[in-house]
Amino acid sequence: MPNSTSIAPKPVLKTIDYYMVGISKLEGFSNPIKLSSNESALGMSPLAIEAGKKSLERGYLYPEVDTEQLAF
């Protein structure tokens, strides 16, 4: 008798190919660019760069001890 509380994946998930860690060859490409999950071939967004610069200007500030709201 199956356990009615057990969780099973959808059958379609069994048809997905496994991720090949460290793959460096890709059919149809002579020299693919290999990126990790946290990398981008496009570089940082200009908005992210600007936000980083602005946050450095306030890096010396600390929140009030009894505050319940974020400073930003």
Image (spheres, grey):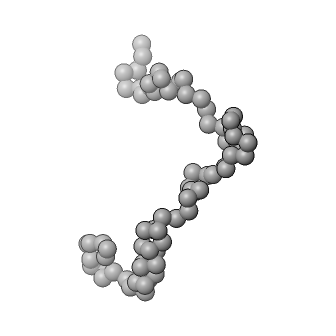
Residue sitting at the far bottom: 60
Residue 11 vertical placement versus 60 (above, below): above
Q: Which image quadrant is residue 22 in?
A: top right
Name the spot of residue 1 as percent of width and height, x first. Answer: 42, 13
Residue 18 vertical placement versus 31 (above, below): above
Name the spot of residue 61 as percent of width and height, x first. Answer: 38, 85
Q: Which image quadrant is residue 68 in?
A: bottom left
How many numbered discs, if any?
A: 0
Q: Residue, x 72% and y 46% (percent of image)?
A: 31
Q: Quadrant of the C terminus?
A: bottom left
Name the spot of residue 14 as percent of width and height, x first. Answer: 53, 24
Front residue (pair 37, 30): 30
Residue 19 vertical placement versus 52 (above, below): above
Front residue (pair 44, 69): 44
Q: Residue, x 59% and y 29% (percent of image)?
A: 17
Image-based side of 64 in relation to 24, left or right: left
Residue sitting at the far top: 1
Name the spot of residue 29 as percent of width and height, x first. Answer: 69, 40
Front residue (pair 13, 29): 29
Q: Residue, x 48% and y 64% (percent of image)?
A: 45
